[in-house]
Image (cartoon, rainbow, N blue to C red):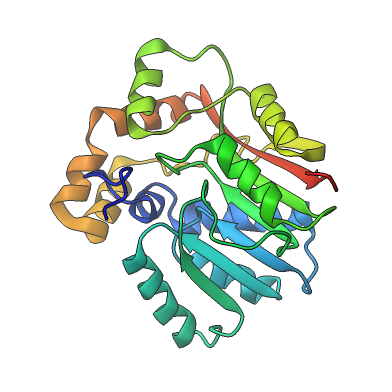
Amino acid sequence: MTDPRAGRRLPTDALVTILQPWDEIAEPLHRRLVHVLDPSPEWDTLWVGAGAARSALWWAKRVGGHVAALDPRPAAVEWAERAARSSGLSRRVTLQAGWADDLPHETDVFDLIVLSLLLQPRVDAGEAMRQAARVVRPRRPVAALVPTWSGTPPEGPAADLARLGIHPRFLVEWKATLRDAGFVELTAEAIAPDGRWLASGWIGVLLRAWRAAGVRAVSGMLAREIRALRALVRTRALGASLITGVRWIDA
């Protein structure tokens, strides 16, 4: 049966590849996460929403421990499994198909969850955080990368983002969502205070789009919704925040 959320839009991993290129955007965000979280190499980590493989492989090499990663498309998982085998990390990296708001994991099995909601169209963010609270162990952390309004959202561009399935919130609303899911000891910071959490420069974006999915991806990058997204980020009306919390025992 076809997932009702699937459509003709570019898949999430293509959006990440095009709009958050590894060397320019993604790896610096990962390094910042390691600095903030200071994870133990003994921890079992779950990466949700950060692409099919590269984040998990980088985390396993840099931090250690066992890393699980989630992608909604079985084909992407198959590709990621091949990448894990070729890098010699298949015993330390587990890849599985699934959605951020419907995690296919048992309760209380991870020491850390990194939940990237920056480019996760059609995902219920509140349910994703409740799922994270279910599968992380008590007194262990979750880190959520979220799109955040820095002022009153303009009506037209906000509607364009909604059509992409992206629903930014004010920082206070994101913190309330984590609190309602059962997390305490909340902290928040701008993960990219210079506004660089999406790639700048049309030429690079379109070249990556062509490599990712040819004409379809190039056309997608020129769509009004994507242009609105990039404009909001460029003017810093839309930012990226890192919110961390610790799962309370009774969550």
Q: Is residue 233 above or below residue 45?
A: above
- Expressed as whole percent of the image width and height from the top left, the position of residue 218 reads 20, 46
Q: Residue 13: which quarter of the image?
A: bottom left
Give the answer, above or below, for where 5 lies relative to 41. above
Could you tell me residue 198's position as x and y percent? 45, 42
Left or right, 139 with reference to 20: right
Identify the residue shown where x is 24% and y is 60%: 211
119 relative position to 105: left or right: left
Residue located at (32% from left, 68% from top): 75
| Looking at the image, residue 41 lies above or below residue 152 | below
Q: Nearer the viewer, residue 163 or 99?
A: 99
Is 110 drawn above or below residue 146 in the view shown?
below
From the viewer's side, name the closer residue of 139 and 152. 139
Image quadrant occupied by the C terminus: top right
Residue 180 pos. (x, y %) = 72, 31
Q: Quadrant of residue 162?
A: top left
Indicate the quadrant containing the N terminus: top left, top right, bottom left or bottom right: bottom left
Q: Check the image and name the residue furthest to the left.
A: 215
Farthest residue toward the front? 1
Q: Residue at x 22, y 36 (%)?
A: 222
Q: Nearer the viewer, residue 31 or 120?
A: 120
From the top left corner, tell me how far across and down residue 160 is, in percent: 33, 24
Q: How many labels, in total? A: 0
Query: In the visual, does 76 lie left or right of 175?
Result: left
Residue drawn 57% across the image and 76% down it: 93
